Image (cartoon, rainbow, N blue to C red):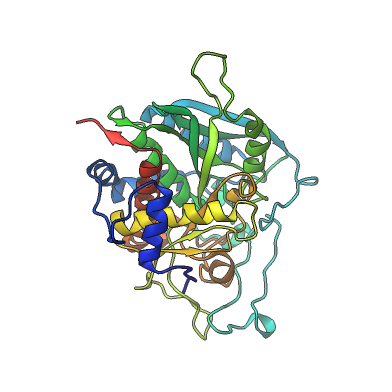
Amino acid sequence: MQRRFLSSAAALVIGSLMLGHPVAGQQKPGPEPDIQMLVGRLDLQRYKATIESLSGFGDRRQGTKRNRDAIDWIEAQLKSYGCAEVSRLTYSYNASTATSNDAQPETATAFKGPGPGGATVFGRGRRPVVNRDLTKQPDAKIRELDREEPIDGERHEVYCTKVGAAHPNEMYIVGGHMDGHGVNQGSNDDASGTALVMELARIFSNASVRTDRSIRFVLWNNEETGHQGAAAYVKQRGPLQGVENPAGSGRYPEPRWLGMIQHDMMLFDHGAPGPDGRVSPTQRREADVNIEFQVRSQKANESMALAFALKAANEIYASDYPAAVGPHMTNTDSNDFMNVVASVSVREAERGSEIGGGWDPLGHTPGDVFTAYTDEDFRLGLNAAQTTLSAVAQLVDAKVSR
């Protein structure tokens, strides 16, 4: 099970303090009507449909036409939601000179498990292989979609903004990576996180919703090669924080960052491998939404507070699955933010000991396709969306006009 730092009651206290809410006798507060209304606008079937549409592009591997086509589609969707300032960040990627930034590279081979020869030991099995063999994908259509190999050069990633009415110069970043690999559809890694971010962009962009602070929704590229897309954003946009442009306009192209919330693999919490190395085909009863911060980061205290703010929101607004907080955030886009702003990663399972220990055998394999997941799996992702939406709504003081 995910390590918990504090009791449920203590998590509520920290989350409430983080959100600026009074804590009366440490009693669990009831839902706020405006936030409950926003959470109610999340819909399982719509979330699934967005994942299915993204899956239709194949694995969306960086540096390919399928990746560029998916970016075009995401951009069009964000515009259709009315999300403001839909923009692209452009950067260059060269595989021979890129640094890994802590992510598993595209060319990785199989990892051996902790036991001799990769045998299962104490709930950990053989870690998944990054597949690049087309012949291992049984679906001919997916094989053809994923046939093109990436080339170096210019890359794009899309973002848009809900502009705050009272404090447009401050914002929270909500992200997920849209690229994948493995000769699959990348339905969990990371269409599930991309769809979550897109659903939040749709809901917050509705004309009936007012927020005091801004929210930026970003769909990163190049996560699978070492999150160079997130690193490019930090490098290019970081120095622009809080700068009014044009002067006196009240416009802030890059508001000051208050926190970054990343979403990477939302669907699969089936438990540890058994003695035979196999993982259960169904969601485990103890499934939860994992919220991680990096205890070794320069913003560890602020990140822990943000993580517990999400946990507190989960306890009030999530419909099915609880949340757990852990200190070992790694291998995703939020790592590029963690030393400059409070940063957390929301996942299906703990990244290091669980996903890294073989708890998701479909990751980066031909098995990560839309039809591999059931409504129980998709509902876990929806609960992650409920968790982030409700926490962010409180952090930006969202209101809904009636």
Q: Is residue 153 visible?
A: no
Residue 388 point in image, percent of width and height: 40, 49
Residue 59 point in image, percent of width and height: 54, 49
User: What is the count of numbered marks?
Assistant: 0
Depth check: give the residue in front, 83 or 212: 212
Residue at the (46%, 74%) spot, across then down: 1
Q: Position of 132 compared to 360: left or right? A: right
Depth check: give the residue in front, 15 or 157: 15
Work out which residue is located at the far front of the displayed protein and give it. Answer: 25
Work out which residue is located at the far right of the displayed protein and give it. Answer: 97
Residue 77 point in image, percent of width and height: 41, 33
Residue at the (49%, 82%) spot, across then down: 274
Q: Is residue 288 above or below residue 275?
A: above
Residue 107, image quadrant: bottom right
Residue 198, image quadrant: top left
Depth check: give the residue in front, 172 or 381: 172
Residue 157, image quadrant: top right
Q: Position of 67 compared to 216: left or right? A: right
Q: Is residue 306 above or below residue 116?
A: above
Quarter the C terminus occupies:
top left
Q: Is residue 110 above or below residue 22?
A: below
Q: Is residue 200 visible?
A: yes
Residue 373 point in image, percent of width and height: 39, 61
Depth check: give the residue in front, 51 or 56: 51
